[in-house]
Amino acid sequence: MNNETSKTKFLYQLRQYGLRKFFISLDFIIAISVLITASLDNHYKLHIFSSGDGGYVVEIFATASTLFAITLAALAILLSFSGGEFVEFLRKNNKLFPLLFPFWIGSVAYLIVIVLSVLYLILHLETFNLFREYLYPFIISIFIYGIINTFYLLATVIRFGYFLDIYEKFKNDKN
């Protein structure tokens, strides 16, 4: 596999983004806090995050699926606005990966929520109740992480517009 292709892999981009930046971020800390709170809620049957029957999972599944589609649509719109020269401009100025990686994170978060929600709904049998109890807090916390990341995607879109403006000025000054 050539070097340029390996740069498109999730783990490579995560390392470029910075593991420390990822794990010490406000959205990750909030997600971990929600995980702990939801686990305590589940253990002590406080019903802060659920009605006790896990009925919110279907709504979370539907919302995560919708937000996943919106995230992909936003990425497609951004990429349609960027020509090859603009992408090269971003790459030379080390702005391409920081602009694209939040879409990776958001998409991965929503996909994990979708998969865990389906697993949760499949394991509705009484035999798997204990496993479901542990699964629910993860679904909630990763979903909250995805929601927070969606707000960061808005900032990414704004930065993209800002860089596009800089590129147009640079291109016009060059001519």
Image (cartoon, rainbow, N blue to C red):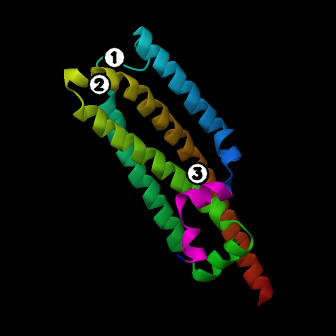
Amino acid identity at mark 1: Ser
Give residue 12's mark: none
Image: 28 above or below 33: below
Image: 42 above or below 101: above
Residue pointed to by mark 2: 55
Label 3 secondary element = helix
Residue positioned most to the right: 173
- Answer yes or no: do the residues labelled 2 and 1 have beta carbons within 8 Å? yes
Q: Nearer the viewer, residue 38 or 50?
A: 38
In the rendering, at what x and y percent does residue 38 appear?
A: 47, 21
Look at 29% across and 24% down and name the residue there. 55
Marks 1 and 3, how far apart in space?
A: 32 Å
Look at 63% across and 51% down and name the residue there. 155
Marks 3 and 2, how far apart in space?
A: 30 Å
Q: Nearer the viewer, residue 104 or 13?
A: 13
Q: Earlier in the sequence, mark 1 or mark 3?
A: 1
Residue positioned most to the front: 1
- Select label 1 or label 3 by which is in front: 1
Residue pointed to by mark 3: 154
Look at 23% across and 35% down and name the residue there. 122
Give residue 51's mark: 1
In the rendering, at what x and y percent does residue 162 appear?
A: 69, 64
Range of residues picked out in magenta: 2-16
Q: Quadrant of the C terminus?
A: bottom right
Q: Is residue 40 visible?
A: yes
Residue positioned most to the bottom: 175
When asked about the image quadrant of residue 131, the answer is: top left
**Is residue 66 in the magenta section?**
no
**Is residue 4 in the magenta section?**
yes
Mark 3 is surrounded, within 10 Å at the Cα level, by few (under 14), some (14 to 19) or many (20 or more) other residues, namely few
Look at 72% across and 67% down and name the residue there. 94
